[in-house]
Image (cartoon, helix red, strand yellow):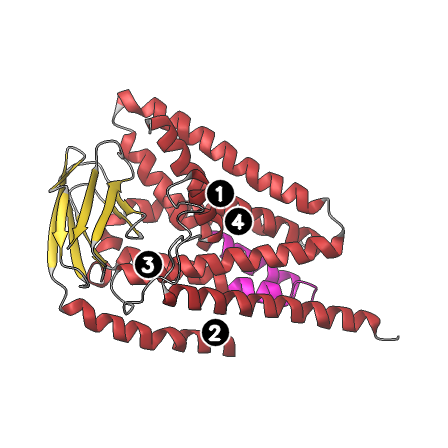
Amino acid sequence: MSLLTNSLLLVLREILEAAVLLGLLWNYTNFRQLSMRWLWWATPIALGLSFLYATNLGTVTDLFDGSGQELLSAALHILVYFPVLVLLAGIYGGLSSRLAEKIMSLVLIAAAVREGSEILIYLGAFTQLEAQRNMVWLGAFIGAGIGISAGVLVSALIHNLSRPIAILLVGVLLSFVASGMMMQGVSLLDQVGLLPYSSSVYSTEWLISERSILGQLLYAVFGYDSEPTRTQMALYLTCLALALALLFSADKVHWGRDETPQ
Amino acid sequence: MRIRVLSGFWLLPLILCGSLDVKAAPEFTIELQNHLFSPNEVEIPANTKVKLRIINKDAMPEEFESYELNREKIVAGGASITVFIGPLPPGEYPFFGEFNPRTAQGRVIVR
């Protein structure tokens, strides 16, 4: 794989998840008729924290007996899932505008910090290498462009749907993305030996390899794992069921309220 | 709030069980220099949890990654990291450095 392709894929993979998530939150903001101001202060905070993480990687790694990177990343993944549950419960209303905006900021910051820091570390590593720098930056630029375009495309496609379908689709996609992040978080805990051994449930490597571009993109957005362990799968299904149950109960409450005679 | 508390408790026993295996895990060391892993093949026992210590002797950071082992972790320049793998069935499990995938390649051989 050339340096250009490697750089493109690395940056695309890191940006895609945040771009899709941002697209979903943008639609959430629209159909809840909220202000977009949350994005203007969440973005600099996310960038600042990414920079802080990237420049203090050694210190973070050494925390908790060398498990700092994994524990911090797992915490960030969990910090996406639980606030998303609150957003799902209030997707039809019942969640104040101010609280919804704060929660969306938190979700975006938590999702962007790890990915943002990895991009900064990667680009920073090649800054001194003049021969390779241009290729890496070009690949990163193209990758970022594709990732952002994908996020815009998701937003535009959902925006053009009828309101009830758009709300449902945003809710379902948020459930999958957030549950996927929980699965990635669990995998990180396993990496530092904090989880007991559990064997793989199945293998879909023959269908979509994790090495393939599609596999890497599915991993980035939905936490795709071609050979998940029983622990990962159990947690993923529990998280997904909980998120979807909240979404559909919010839906039921909403329609029940609408049909109540005035 | 209740949901959040319950989910946290659900993970706690798993984490406690997991931390018990870690203490007894045998350690294997891999060095990274000039974007090459040395040794580039590490033989580990089957069905045993092991600790891989990766020492980066380059000034440039690298990301240790393996799809087969389901592991990814950045190691800063001149620093080291620890990654736990296994227990694994016999087989070959490739790994690579994501920042320099053409040169930084290796594999874990489980026997």
Asked if residue B56 can be seen in this view, the reply is no
Amino acid under disc 2: Arg
- Residue marked by disc 4: A41
Magenta segment, which residues?
A83-109
Where is residue A256? Give x, y as percent: 77, 73
Which structural element holds mark 2? Answer: helix
Q: Is residue A60 left or right of residue B8?
A: left
Magenta part, dominant SS: helix
Q: Which mark is residue B4?
A: 2
- Residue marked by disc 3: A188
Task: Say whether residue A166 is magenta.
Answer: no
**Residue extending farthest right:** A262
Q: Is residue A160 left or right of residue A37?
A: right
Give the Cα distance between marks 1 and 3. 20 Å
**Residue shown at 35%/22% (left/top)?**
A134
Structural crowding at the residue carrying mark 1, measured as other residues with C-alpha within 10 Å and reported as few (<14), some (14–19) or many (≥20): many
* Same-chain check, marks 2 and 3: no
Identify the subunit bearing mark 4.
A
Amino acid under disc 1: Leu
Identify the subunit bearing mark 2.
B
Q: Which mark is residue A171?
A: none
Seen in the picture, residue B56 relative to A85 is either above or below; the reply is above
| Location of residue A110 by image quarter | bottom left
